[in-house]
């Protein structure tokens, strides 16, 4: 039979137009070809001829920028349109009674036009030339009108939903209408036509950065589904080994900082709304769901769609086997004929084996596409979650007080497990979380289909699975217990190992290696026992996952074959049942893995909750501006120590009563402790630290001076009271940056306003310069001034590479005084308005201490009106203090100026004078001993062995050293009149330089 557009039968109704041309089915189908031909003729010249002359108005370096709104919706609608058109083509071909081209030729042209439209749109989008979209607007309008005419004529001729062609035409009307609305929305948003001023769109920030090469968020859906965007990486890796430079930077939305901000916002949003906020684990899970719930829902949706499409395989196999099993009636003969054409129903269409084979192919293709999309979204979300949680843990650790770490509330081993293990458990939970929702759906649908095929026998197989489920739960519980004990033993082992590594020198010195080795080995044996139990339960779980489906299949088939003799057990039923049981293997296999991952995530979340409960400094936000100030060099001589009784500094800024509230920090009724259970280390602390002045804290050893600084900084646990930080004036203008006073419990880390030099100095594993600058901008003048103030230049000169010498644990060893001065230099170099110095003179001799006090603390800090808090035992520096805080036994003994203390606490003042005089006497003895040592080791041997001895003696005290000079002279005289050499003369010249 020859082919013809309207058919080749004699007296065919397809050629009759007695009732009007629109009532002729062939004419209506021919009318539907017009929009597709129009689009092909319009777009092909633009795509293949004139496209090279078009230029983009916006410069971009990637051809993957999604310019137009409704991009994803357009691609989804186009994919659905292509599938419906394939079904329409198949429906026309199945009608084998005639060779009417108008039944499948218009859908074929529509299929080609749909592909052309999406290619045309992609090229317009990547070139940013939206005016050419007017062709698509005309095409969607014409296609919608012509398809609506065909649908209306079907309704006029009483063609209803029972006919497949009617349903397909209705779907096409809806799809063309939605695509037309998408095109109108592009015009509304971009205003490229029918508007005077079109909307200009700038490229995304990621695509403006040439370093971003990860383009997955910016490509179209087809490229995402087929991973076409990875071709550039694959080609690069094929040519040479790929590195970080070739991979490039991540987009902003995928970086750890962005995900951390999203997670932190989810944590803080309930607090800002003043709504009842769930405590404990509920708040954590709620924040995780708010921050990363949407991609997880998308991944779960993809997974459910993939699982549902997976059931198309058994159904199609059953239909194909059933169709092939029939020896007769291999060819379908449609019976219904309307408007000169044959119509078939959906049931008749799906009874064709070839149609089922094509549907099976598309179902498997879509299933794998959705499954891979689900995996990708889940894995990406889990990695983003891990990065956000690790960043949050890091910020939390940086805000923990010293008491949390020193008192064992949070150890380094726990922190390592929290960052490395627990975050991975949460990540894996998000990887497998879509299975948590998809597996029940897959199991329920599978059991329903098995019941449809096998009847009550399927319920028996399902009962086998249900009976063995408690055994799986028991194994999973034991598995979680083994996992928990393994984590505990791992924490203990890491704690002991870190302790041993820190004190390795002491262990070697006392030969304690075997003791600590046995302790660590014992803990390791417990950990290995727990790991063996964990491996055993894992093996049992895997075995059960593989054995349960096989047992269910065997029991089901045996019961179905022997107990139900009249039941249908045809090849189609057997093959479909095997396929369904094979599908159920996957959710049953993943069930224990999902349960294990969920339990591990709950355990890790509980550990994270305990970590989140650790006390930390809390403060209201106070975003103040701190600017670097230029160094001011002011010559200030120290007041004489003899003038204590009548001391008054003319250069000191007096503290008037009007400035009583001009404080930097104020502590009221403060009680601080290192351990929550113990008694307070500091009690009844009521002090104020004046702003822009030098405050000294003095007292006996162990009275709590260092603890007071740490309590103010938030490094101790506060029992009661308040620590109040006032707004800090700008160093240059003297004006308040923030007019409000911030009341908080601890110092705000966000302000970075305190430079702190601890009593025990510490160094980074870096160069001397990096230790001093400490990530601050390098300023040559300020750096040299700090080096001079701390007397570090002679020490730097003797280092192998100067200030570029590596110091710290991995670098060159430094003395205690050198480490102390580098630590103080770090505090002096920082551009902060508040400086805390905890006994910076402890490892320095008197000359270095005087130089540091004069040049560093007085000239660099106090003259610049910076608030300085100095803890010291050197009472000779008290005359320089603007404010003095005396401590005793963890309490404040007295505070005020030196004159105030002299008037009100005369006994304390006299005690200080006695201690200072004693320090001066010890200092003089120390200097005298040093000078005698120099004479004994250097000058005296020279006088004995040389013919002439010239002694160059330098003393800062002038003529106070004349007795020593006379002693040297007597030695020289006695050397001249020796009995063995009476004629031998020795000239001894003494040059005294005062």
Image (cartoon, rainbow, N blue to C red):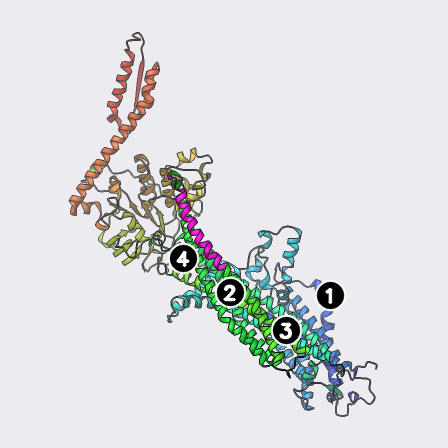
Task: Please state the horizontal and vertical placement of residue 390, each as a whole percent of the image.
Answer: 46, 58
- Circle 2 — which element? helix
Query: Does residue 525 belong to the magenta stretch?
Result: yes
Q: Which residue is mark 2?
A: 430
773 w.r.t. 380: above or below: above
Q: CA distance from mark 3 to mark 2?
A: 31 Å
Residue 888 coordinates in the image, percent (x, y)? 22, 48
Does 766 sit left or right of 137 as displayed?
A: left
Q: Residue at x 58, y 68 (%)?
A: 586
**Front one among 869 and 583:** 583
Q: Secondary structure at mark 3?
A: helix
- Tell me which residue sits at (79%, 84%) in the image: 98
| First-in-chain label (4 vs 2) | 4
State the separation of the CA atoms marked 1 and 3.
51 Å
Q: Residues within 10 Å of mark 2 (few under 14, many from 20)?
A: many
10 Å neighbourhood of mark 3: few (<14), some, or many (≥20)?
some
**x and y, in percent, of residue 826 in the image:** 39, 44
Residue 709 shown left or right of residue 323 in the figure:
left
Q: Quadrant of the C terminus?
A: top left
Q: Does the image show residue 762?
A: yes
Near mark 1 (Cα within 10 A), the count class, few <14, some 14-19 or many ≥20, is: few
Q: Which mark is residue 578?
A: 3
């Amino acid at each position: 039979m020859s082919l013809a557009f309207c058919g080749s039968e004699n007296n065919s109704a397809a050629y009759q137009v007695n009732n009007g041309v629109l009532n002729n089915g062939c004419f209506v189908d021919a009318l539907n070809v017009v929009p597709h031909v129009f689009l092909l003729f319009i777009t092909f010249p633009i795509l293949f001829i004139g496209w090279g002359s078009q230029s983009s108005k916006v410069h971009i370096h990637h051809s993957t920028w999604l310019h137009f709104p409704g991009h994803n919706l357009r691609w989804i609608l186009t994919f659905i349109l292509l599938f419906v058109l394939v079904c329409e083509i198949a429906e026309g071909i199945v009608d084998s009674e005639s060779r009417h081209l108008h039944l499948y030729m218009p859908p074929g042209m529509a299929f080609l036009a749909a592909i052309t439209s999406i290619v045309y749109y992609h090229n317009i989008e990547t070139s940013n030339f939206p005016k050419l979209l007017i062709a698509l607007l005309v095409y969607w309008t014409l296609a919608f009108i012509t398809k609506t005419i065909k649908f209306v004529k079907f309704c006029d001729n009483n063609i209803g939903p029972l006919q497949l062609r009617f349903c397909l035409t209705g779907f096409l009307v809806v799809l063309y209408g939605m695509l037309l609305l998408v095109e109108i929305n592009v015009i509304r948003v971009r205003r490229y036509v029918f508007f005077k001023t079109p909307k200009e769109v700038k490229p995304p920030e990621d695509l403006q950065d040439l370093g971003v090469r990860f383009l997955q968020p910016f490509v179209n859906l087809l490229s995402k589904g087929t991973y076409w965007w990875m071709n550039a990486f694959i080609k690069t890796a094929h040519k040479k080994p790929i590195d970080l430079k070739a991979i490039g930077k991540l987009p902003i939305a995928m970086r750890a900082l962005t995900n951390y901000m999203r997670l932190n916002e989810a944590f803080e949003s309930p607090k800002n709304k003043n709504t009842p906020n769930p405590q404990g684990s509920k708040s954590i899970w709620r924040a995780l769901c708010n921050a990363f719930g949407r991609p997880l829902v998308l991944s779960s949706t993809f997974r459910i769609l993939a699982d549902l499409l997976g059931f198309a395989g058994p159904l199609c196999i059953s239909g194909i086997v059933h169709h092939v099993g029939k020896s007769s009636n291999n060819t379908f003969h449609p019976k219904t004929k309307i408007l000169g054409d044959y119509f078939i129903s959906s049931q008749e269409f799906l009874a064709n084996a070839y149609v089922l084979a094509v549907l099976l192919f598309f179902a498997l293709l879509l299933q794998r596409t959705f499954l891979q999309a689900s995996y990708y979204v889940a894995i990406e979300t889990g990695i983003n979650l891990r990065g956000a949680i690790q960043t949050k843990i890091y910020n939390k650790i940086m805000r923990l007080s010293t008491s949390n770490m020193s008192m064992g509330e949070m150890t380094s081993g726990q922190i390592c497990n929290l960052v490395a293990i627990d975050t991975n458990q949460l990540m894996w939970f998000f990887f497998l979380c879509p299975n948590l929702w998809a597996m029940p759906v897959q199991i329920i649908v599978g059991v329903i289909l098995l019941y449809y095929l096998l009847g009550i026998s399927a319920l028996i197989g399902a009962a086998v699975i249900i009976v063995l489920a408690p055994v799986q739960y028991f194994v999973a519980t034991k598995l979680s217990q083994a996992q928990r004990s393994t984590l505990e033993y791992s924490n203990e082992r890491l704690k002991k190992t870190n302790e041993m590594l820190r004190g390795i020198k002491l262990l070697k010195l006392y030969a304690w290696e075997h003791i600590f080795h046995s302790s660590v080995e014992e803990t390791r044996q417990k950990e290995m026992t727990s790991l063996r139990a964990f491996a055993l339960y894992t093996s049992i779980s895997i075995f059960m996952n593989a054995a349960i489906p096989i047992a269910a299949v065997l029991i089901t088939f045996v019961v179905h074959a022997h107990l139900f003799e009249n039941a249908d057990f045809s090849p189609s039923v057997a093959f479909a049942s095997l396929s369904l049981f094979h599908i159920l293997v996957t959710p049953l296999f993943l069930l224990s893995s999902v349960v294990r991952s969920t339990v591990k995530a709950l355990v890790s979340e509980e550990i994270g909750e305990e970590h989140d409960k650790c006390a930390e400094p809390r403060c209201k936000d106070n975003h103040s501006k701190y600017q670097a100030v230029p160094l001011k060099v002011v010559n200030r001589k120290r007041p004489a120590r003899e003038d204590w009784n009548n001391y008054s500094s003319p250069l000191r800024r007096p503290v008037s009563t009007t400035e009583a509230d001009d404080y930097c920090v104020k502590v009221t009724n403060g009680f601080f402790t290192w351990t929550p259970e113990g008694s307070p280390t500091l009690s009844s602390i009521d002090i104020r630290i004046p702003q822009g002045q030098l405050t000294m804290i003095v007292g006996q050893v162990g009275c709590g001076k260092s603890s007071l600084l740490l309590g103010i900084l938030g490094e101790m646990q506060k029992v009661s009271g308040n620590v109040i930080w006032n707004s800090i004036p700008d160093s240059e203008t003297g004006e308040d940056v923030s007019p409000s006073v911030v009341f908080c419990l601890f110092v705000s880390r966000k302000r970075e306003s305190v430079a702190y030099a601890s009593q025990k100095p510490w160094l980074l594993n870096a160069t001397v310069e990096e230790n001093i600058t400490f990530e601050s901008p390098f300023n040559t003048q300020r750096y040299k001034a700090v080096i001079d103030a701390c007397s570090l230049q002679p020490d730097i000169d003797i280092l192998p590479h100067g200030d570029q010498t590596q110091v710290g644990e991995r670098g060159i060893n430094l003395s205690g005084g050198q480490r102390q001065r580098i630590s103080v230099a770090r505090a002096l170099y920082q551009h902060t308005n508040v400086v805390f110095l905890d006994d910076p003179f402890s490892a320095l001799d008197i000359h270095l201490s005087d130089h540091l006090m004069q040049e560093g603390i007085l000239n660099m800090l106090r003259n610049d009106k910076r608030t300085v808090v100095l803890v010291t035992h050197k009472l000779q520096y008290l005359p320089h203090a603007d404010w003095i805080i005396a401590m005793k036994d963890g309490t404040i003994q007295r505070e005020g100026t030196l004159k105030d203390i002299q008037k009100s606490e005369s006994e304390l003042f006299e005690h200080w004078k006695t201690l200072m005089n004693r320090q001066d006497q010890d200092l003089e003895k120390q200097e005298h001993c040093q000078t005698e040592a120099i004479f004994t080791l250097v000058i005296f041997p020279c006088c004995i062995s040389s013919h002439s001895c010239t002694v160059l003696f330098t003393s800062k005290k002038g003529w106070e050293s004349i007795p020593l000079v006379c002693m040297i002279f007597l030695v020289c005289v006695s050397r001249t009149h020796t009995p063995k050499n009476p004629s031998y003369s020795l000239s001894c010249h003494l040059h005294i330089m005062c």
